[in-house]
Image (cartoon, rainbow, N blue to C red):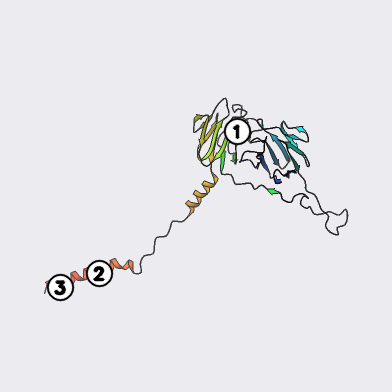
Amino acid sequence: MKLVFPNGEHAPVILTQGVTRLGSDPESTIVLNRPGVLPRHFEIHVSGAGANVQRPETAGALSVNGRAVVGMMALRNGDQLAFAGINARFVAIETTRPAPGAVPGAPQETALPADDSGATRVRAAAPRYVLRGVSGAIFGKTYAITGPTVLGRASECDICIPVDEISRRHAIVRPNPEGLAVEDLGSSNGSFINNKRVQTGQLLPGDELRLDQVRLLLVAPGTELQQAQQQARPAPAPPPAPIGGRWIKPLAGLVILASLAFIVALLLR
């Protein structure tokens, strides 16, 4: 699956499983700094069942084949997406090319799409931060944080927490060099960092984020791996003793004893 821009606003992008965000935000998967493109204009969700395009509540206008997108809409091969004066085409299937000398009607090998040249494959980067559920309905679940992430009860949230006490759009977290910047989105029951209620705050690795009574722990997989590697390194071996060094003290003692015996023998003559 891929997204093609016929007018050249962006190179073709191969869509991998997961969420692909398009917008002017530098942390988006597809960054388009064009007039009318909002920081988070829309998202494409790819799974084993197919692809859907989602327009967040605060996003800009988007249409598929001339039909306005409200919420989420399934994408099919050849669908035309229009937004902010930009057109894009969703390509979902591969074409086949007959091999030279092949018999008509015989099975053919699958080839790359005819318009695949120049496509950019978006590499899935290893997450720098992960939120791990440690209570309630999300206990044991982990959520990789690679960009601005909304947590809430609504199904369109990046992290959906199906708990009545959680607001539809409860909070948003944004990764930064220290951890995650947390912002409460006007929730009814509040957002807490280490049991302190905050409107905005900084979550560091090892800190706990609590939304009402639902708790998540921030972990940094890369940091944990480095610490584990450092702990696994063997301690440096002590430098080797000089040749004959272990005999110096015993020999010195024998010399002293011999000298004393000689002195005593002279005195007794």
Between 3 and 95, the residue placed more toward the observer is 3
Q: CA distance from mark 3 to mark 1?
A: 95 Å
Q: Give the total of numbered labels.
A: 3
Q: Which residue is mark 1?
A: 151
Q: Position of residue 262 (x, y in %)?
A: 17, 72
What residue is disc 2 on?
254
Mark closer to the observer (1, 2): 1
**Mark 3: which amino acid?**
Ala
Distance in Å between CA atoms under marks 1 and 2: 79 Å
- Quarter assignment of residue 71: top right
Residue 265's label in the rendered image is 3
Q: Give neighbour class at mark 1: few <14, some 14-19, many 20+ (Cα, 10 Å).
A: many
The image's mark for residue 62 is none
Which image quarter: residue 186? top right
- In space, the residues marked 2 and 3 are separated at their CA atoms by 17 Å
Q: What percent of the width, then of the height, locates residue 194?
A: 49, 33
Report the residue at 13% width, 73% height from top. Answer: 266
Q: Quadrant of the N terminus?
A: top right
* Mark 3 neighbour density, 10 Å: few (under 14) some (14–19) many (20 or more): few
Q: Nearer the viewer, mark 3 or mark 1?
A: 1
- Residue 232 vs residue 87: left or right? left
**Which residue occupies the extreme top position in the image?**
188
Amino acid tagged 2: Leu
Q: Position of residue 209 (x, y in %)?
A: 53, 34
Q: Secondary structure at mark 1?
A: strand
Residue appearing at x 60%, y 33% in the figure:
151
Crowd band around label 2 with a 10 angstrom C-alpha radius: few (<14), some (14–19), many (20+): few
> Which quadrant does the C terminus fall into?
bottom left
